[in-house]
Image (tube, rainbow, N blue to C red):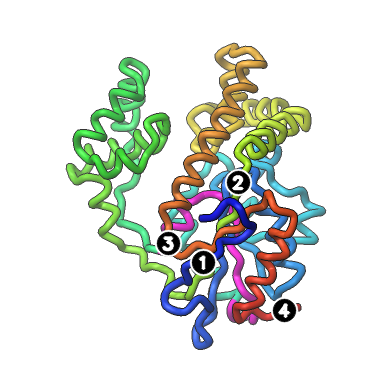
Amino acid sequence: MTSGSCVDANPRPHRESGKLSEHQPGVVFLMGPTASGKTRCACRIYDEFRCELISVDAAQVYRNMNIGTAKPDQAFLHRYPHHLIDIRHMDEKYSAAAFCADASGLIAEIHQRGNTPVLVGGTMFYFSALENGLSNLPSADMNLRSVIDMEIREKGISALYQELSDVDPRSARRISPFDSQRIQRAVELYRLTRVPPSELMTRSNMPALTNPIIKIALFTSDRKTLHRQIEHRFMQMLEAGLINEVKAIIRDQDNPRQLTSMRAIGYRQVLEFLYDKVDYQKMLDNGAAATRQLAKRQLTWMRNQSNLVWFDLSHARAINALLEYLRTQPLSEK
């Protein structure tokens, strides 16, 4: 990746050619860290090409979670329709397997309509699962999960991370020592199967996507600018009524802190503010810090992928350069 230009000077092409196959319709992956400008780029692509947008966001699938997920409003979605937004109630679970099933079906339908699917978002595991297939993992065991929750309260997440490091160093290297949700799930999988999670992930039962993929990576080389954007966006969410949104969820749900949907950044910090009496400034600091850590993990994941073409949105011509690049691919323009 080169940070001095808006596009990587020597992008590695996907598979063998750098273009989509003329015989099999392709797919565009538009990836980037939170607050990097993915939606803005997706809109420009939608305006220029015959395409349909598929959201790759683990939180925007939930209804009534709007402000904290930075979900586009209805007027915006009318102009720029996105598949896989508002498809679940917040007390329902949505997994990578469910995403792969939904996205695969949509990709086939979009191709039948003669359009190109553009998948846009920041849930990197969903991109990976769709591209590489998904392992046959056991479902959550709520009794075991309760035991692990208790261990975390008594010993801290660091003890659980050490257990993961001992039984599966590969998974431990891939997971942040502060990512309690993924650490918990990895340890749960090991205790259920006695097989390291990294090995389980190689036993794929959901086939990989066979279509050629153009993988676009968006980033901002000026880290301070990205951090300012993150802090500004979180402030905007609070000013737009995020706390009231969470209060409404609390009124409607019996145990909101146990909902998978409420583990999303922003919601988790507001719940701490409302339940644990964390003061407002601490909530603000925690939310911004968690979002910065998320952006860092997203960038780290992207850097470890192959065949990405990088565009630095710090540069004024980055979006135009992205459109020019896509015109070199066999996508139909409007």
Location of residue 47 by image quarter: bottom right
Q: Earlier in the sequence, mark 4 or mark 2?
A: 2
Badge 3 marks a residue whose secondary structure is loop
Magenta includes 186?
no
- Crowding at dot 1, Cα within 10 Å, few <14 / some 14-19 / many 20+, comes out as few
Residue beneath the point at 57% across and 46% down: 33
In screen coordinates, is 319 left or right of 87?
A: right
Q: Which residue is mark 3?
A: 306
Separation of disc 1 and disc 4 at Cα?
A: 25 Å
User: Which amino acid, mark 3?
Assistant: Ser
Q: Which residue is mark 1?
A: 10
Observer able to see residue 185: yes
- Crowding at dot 2, Cα within 10 Å, few <14 / some 14-19 / many 20+, comes out as some
In front: 96, or 169?
169
Q: Which residue is mark 2?
A: 221
Q: Is residue 152 above or below residue 316?
A: above
Location of residue 29 by image quarter: bottom right
User: Which amino acid, mark 1?
Assistant: Asn
Separation of disc 2 and disc 1 at Cα?
A: 17 Å
Q: Which residue is mark 4?
A: 333
Q: Tell me where residue 153 appears, x and y as whole percent.
A: 37, 18
Q: Which residues are magenta?
A: 111-131
